[in-house]
Amino acid sequence: MNKGLEKVLIKADRVSVHGGHSGQFCQHASDKLEEIVQAYITQGFRWAGITEHIPPASDAMRYPDEKQAGLSADFLQERFAEYFRLGRELQQKYREQIELFLAFEIEHYPGSETHVEALIEQYQPDYLVGSLHHVGKTGIDYSHELFQQALQEAGSMTQLYCDYFDAQFDMLQKFKPSVVGHFDLIRIYDQDYLKTLKQDAVQERITRNLDFIAENRLILDFNLRGFDKAMEQYPSLSIIKQALQKNIALVPGDDSHGVSSVGRNYDQGLTVLSNLGATLDWQKPNLMQY
Ligand SMILES: [Zn+2]
Ligand SMILES: [Zn+2]
């Protein structure tokens, strides 16, 4: 048995605002979507958002793994349609066991806006996870090499963070996503991120973005995947403290990419939130109105 269970006395519902990436619909995930839904049920999740990545706007914007696999943007669009069809079916099929939301994780890069608008119109997701995986058109979380390229294009680490948070502000204003995904993902390959986050120019932007999130009652994805990389969760502790002062809701997102990452690091995350005195009475994402 899991020894950790003896220590965990924190009582809170299991929920996830961000996750359910599956090998069926995402090149860097594993397992079938239904198996992942079943894992949420087995682990006693009260509700979970299934939030697959959107397909790319064009072949040029495919993730490297999609390029390598020779999958065209057209194919990925079709696969996304199948994701939505199946997602709605599973939502119904398991509605007695778990409240599932069918959402998607958007991207923000030059040219993405009309693409995202069209996807919202076509699929009418329950909500959006607003994430950035690019600065400009360069991917930042895929590999160290690509991150270095983005860094070179920006000119300095501080500038890269500024560009990231400015693009995030753009995305927030445009889409007001109910859930803001891994707020400070830009630090993923920066060893000195604690210092970079404290730069005045970076801090100003973080404050501005958090103010917008607070005013619009958006949820910050308390992203448990950060622990996998022997780092903190996203957002970093200093940002969480600022968010709590602004009464922003932090809600766990396991960012699962397969059955094995469903609920991963959950208790570790609860400990962090509970030590900070954050509420464990989770806010649900605002559902989009059509
Ligand atoms: Zn992913
Ligand atoms: Zn993401």
Image: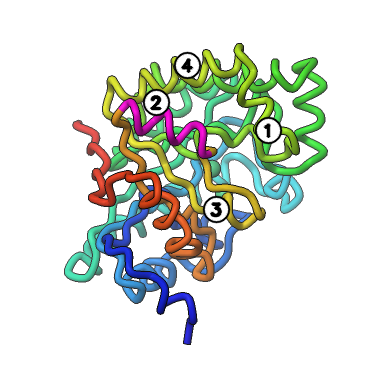
Give the spatial CA distance, label 3 vs label 2: 28 Å
Q: Residues within 10 Å of mark 2 (few under 14, many from 20)?
A: few
Residue at the spot 48% in from the left edge and 60% down from the top edge: 268
Q: Earlier in the sequence, mark 4 or mark 1?
A: 4
Is 151 included in the stretch rendered in magenta? no
In this rendering, the label closer to the viewer, 1 or 2: 1
Q: Which mark is residue 170?
A: 4
Residue interval drawn in magenta: 237-246
Q: Which mark is residue 225?
A: 3
Name the residue type under label 3: Arg
Tell me the residue that label 2 is attached to. Answer: 117
Question: Does the beta carbon of the residue at mark 4 sit less than 8 Å from ligand 2?
Answer: no
Give the spatial CA distance, label 4 vs label 1: 23 Å
Q: Quadrant of residue 201?
A: top right
Image coordinates of residue 54 in percent, x first then y, are 49, 40
Q: Earlier in the sequence, mark 1 or mark 3?
A: 1
